[in-house]
Amino acid sequence: MRIDLNCDMGESFGAYTIGADAEVMASISSANVACGYHGGDPAVMRRTVRLAREAGVAVGAHPGFQDLAGFGRREMRLAPQEIEDMVLYQIGALAAIAQSEGVRLQHVKAHGALYNMAARDRALADAIARAVAAFDPSLILFGLPGSELMRAGAACGLRVASEGFADRAYEPDGSLTPRSRAGAVIHDAEAVVRRAVRMAVDGIVAATDGSEISMHVETICTHGDTPGAQALTRALRAGLERAGIAIAAVAGPRP
Amino acid sequence: MRIDLNCDMGESFGAYTIGADAEVMASISSANVACGYHGGDPAVMRRTVRLAREAGVAVGAHPGFQDLAGFGRREMRLAPQEIEDMVLYQIGALAAIAQSEGVRLQHVKAHGALYNMAARDRALADAIARAVAAFDPSLILFGLPGSELMRAGAACGLRVASEGFADRAYEPDGSLTPRSRAGAVIHDAEAVVRRAVRMAVDGIVAATDGSEISMHVETICTHGDTPGAQALTRALRAGLERAGIAIAAVAGPRP
Amino acid sequence: MRIDLNCDMGESFGAYTIGADAEVMASISSANVACGYHGGDPAVMRRTVRLAREAGVAVGAHPGFQDLAGFGRREMRLAPQEIEDMVLYQIGALAAIAQSEGVRLQHVKAHGALYNMAARDRALADAIARAVAAFDPSLILFGLPGSELMRAGAACGLRVASEGFADRAYEPDGSLTPRSRAGAVIHDAEAVVRRAVRMAVDGIVAATDGSEISMHVETICTHGDTPGAQALTRALRAGLERAGIAIAAVAGPRP
Amino acid sequence: MRIDLNCDMGESFGAYTIGADAEVMASISSANVACGYHGGDPAVMRRTVRLAREAGVAVGAHPGFQDLAGFGRREMRLAPQEIEDMVLYQIGALAAIAQSEGVRLQHVKAHGALYNMAARDRALADAIARAVAAFDPSLILFGLPGSELMRAGAACGLRVASEGFADRAYEPDGSLTPRSRAGAVIHDAEAVVRRAVRMAVDGIVAATDGSEISMHVETICTHGDTPGAQALTRALRAGLERAGIAIAAVAGPRP
């Protein structure tokens, strides 16, 4: 049994540092690297790709809205074609820097508000999927299980990878509990590990009402910009490995 | 005999239009497409690449400083590594969009203040050349004849193409007369055509003091954002063709 | 009888020109000056204030979303406090430049998506009104008649001025026909003038279904960034004056 | 005897935190608040003004180049008029937010590359001084003793306040040792305190060659974005007070 552990990385910008990338990198298998729109800049991108390469971590593009002031977390209403073009732009920019470091991209994961909107809005999801497929049809598209984004990716012929969030509460319908609600983020490391193991082994997660939801996922997201991220990620990896689950990038080890 | 005619293209941004790209495209052989830093945005980039493809015009990246407010014309002091990363970022972004339109990049031409600084500053020129070579060593680097940028490109193993400006006055030492000086830009279409033909046929241009400078160039730049650009570019092409000079992209016709 | 004619102004940015500000200024009585977020920059702001002063036109702040790429026309989901702070920031910036040109602000009109969202969303409308009142409670707030923004302004003790659009179609419920629908923008100058006169004299506008809506307005908006804006605005002023309606800024002539 | 202790504040941006503003505020008497160009955003500006007010610290505007990616530390070549307009824009924006918090600005201190360039370049210094004087001639302009900026401020009729850097090495000619050189920043807290006391009491600082330079200053700058800034600033205040020097804002206590 194996699972991928992914984390948003490279979201620092110029003089501003966010996250503990170097420390977290040691525990994950896939890094979602910001592409300069919601966070990151060309220098940070190079540094992050290098860190990932040295840690044997697969690299993916993490495109977001061009809203640095809002860190890509504020919804913006763009036309699907605008979305497609901006996603392609960001993937291309990161791929160029990655290539110059000898790294090929493994996957694409949309960031923040773009990710959430694409889970519900098929036109937007199609735009993202088209951009990914146009750049490289062998890229793997990450998304919420059962989301419009996963359907759009499959319709474009992309390999898709469903993603679970071990430190986030779920509603009975399988959606994430909004961050604005109490208990939306789970801080207890042991609980997080238990939930991750349950997802990885049984494909099940407990919802806020106690019901169990089917949650078959190939990759589990952990957050790098919260205090204690490093310890939590390390605990997550250790817990999963203790349960006999290998941590490996979705695309498998590179030859 | 043949020469390339290049023009800066795709510098519009969002609701803002600059230049008469569709009209000028009919007369040139190489388009320098802005990459979203000093001008351009992902939608404009796609539109411009498409225009170029339809007109049979070769596409190049036109990276600049991230200074939209100054249109990339204001000098900024960046470290060479910052320059390398930002140039690579911009080339990659454009190449991704171009590829999705079935177009491969032919060349790279730095924009505005970046171009001028790289003509004089070898460390900066090396940074640009490294970015180009890292992305694709078959890309052709445009620059001022005899400039540091041309030397840096050659040292990186790149094919370089010297560029002349038919509508700009030259100092006796071969440098461009600064735009701040009267007569720096030549507006008389006939004079511009005569100068272009002289450059293309004899490899010579007259300096401001009347002396003749050797100016062997493979490509001649024409400006698309000045009033009358369309008519001037058309006159330039017609005048060169009348003189028996074919207009063709530097890399030659694509197979 | 009198009415105010207002127009968005100063939306050029750096090397990019939009609108025919100098020409339109001769026909209007209030200029909504962009503040550097959705358009405009400090130099453009100064130039525009100067043009307004010379033409005897009242100056207002025209704050928008920080989305130059989308010209402030794309909806962004910001918290009310974020809205309040960014509106205050923009008003203050323009007021400083205006003051250095000897001009005091008359009004505030939100731009694009911010204007439309504030018409429907009271929390957002309150945020804008609070920012205006905090800066200067004598500023006049422009908005759609009957909108949440007008209510919020009144609740804050601000003088509000209802605004009509002579060149836009209205739905039977008094809302503007979305631009995406055919006929949303009226291009026939005579029709535009007729509608403006009807609004100014009778307080009535015809809706798309032929019904008549009550539309008591103190100011009529004309658009400066459409082709033919100059001629249309001139025709509008002439038509209103022919009908015996004086064109005067909402706050009345400055002493 | 008294001296002002100033520190750059409010340089966080959106999701990005820089500096330990709340902690440092307790030890200083003047806060230089970033205005959204090189750092800061409207929400951060409000928060910072509030922190200053609560700590009884005077507030000044800290305008910089519009280069968030470079934190305003990279030289940019702007025309003097561009500088004047952008400085005025930033002061106005901060003043509006400060006023809504019941705070009037005390001073203006240019940031980073703008500060350094204005020390040497009179045209640029004049532009800054003109912007300050146009906004409010009672604002105090901070700058290096003997710099062009101090001369420009005085020529504009502004009160100027010379500034010393207790944690920076000085060259024999009174200029700051460039950060690129070893020993440019002094990290030993005791040495920093000793130097500050010497400046405040004797108006003297030791240069890198051991010679003593006259350095009459009204305000001493301490840095808030370095590790240990809080402890150093506290030590600085305590050391100065132990030496019998009161810490008070340049403009004196507000009535």
Image (tube, coloured by chain):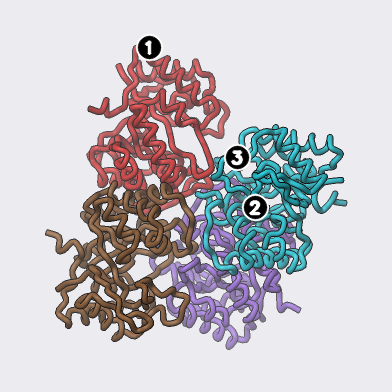
Chain colours: A purple, B cyan, C red, D brown
CA gap between label 3 and label 1 equals 52 Å
Where does the N terminus of chain D fall, quadrant-wise?
A: bottom left
CA gap between label 2 and label 1 equals 63 Å
- Which chain is disc 1 placed on? C
Three-letter code for the amino acid on which mark 1 is drawn: Ala
Mark 3: secondary structure: loop
Q: Residues within 10 Å of mark 2 (few under 14, many from 20)?
A: some
Mark 1: secondary structure: loop
User: Is tag 2's residue or tag 3's residue first in the polypeptide sequence?
Assistant: 2
Q: Is residue C166 visible?
A: yes
**What residue appears at the point 22 percent right and 69 percent down from the top-left corner?**
D4
Query: Could you tell whether A225 is left or right of B150 in the image?
Result: left
Mark 2: secondary structure: loop
Q: Position of residue A132 (x, y in %)?
A: 68, 58
Q: Is residue B49 visible?
A: no
The residue positioned farthest toward the left in the image shown: D255
Three-letter code for the amino acid on which mark 3 is drawn: Gly
Q: Is residue C244 above or below residue C187?
A: above
Q: Nearer the viewer, mark 3 or mark 1?
A: 3
User: Which numbered marker is on residue C15?
Assistant: none
Which residue corresponds to mark 1?
C243
User: Which numbered marker is on residue B183?
Assistant: 3
Is B51 or B227 nearer to us in this picture?
B227
- Which chain is disc 2 placed on? B
Which residue corresponds to mark 2?
B175
Q: Position of residue B64 (x, y in %)?
A: 60, 55
CA gap between label 2 and label 3 equals 14 Å
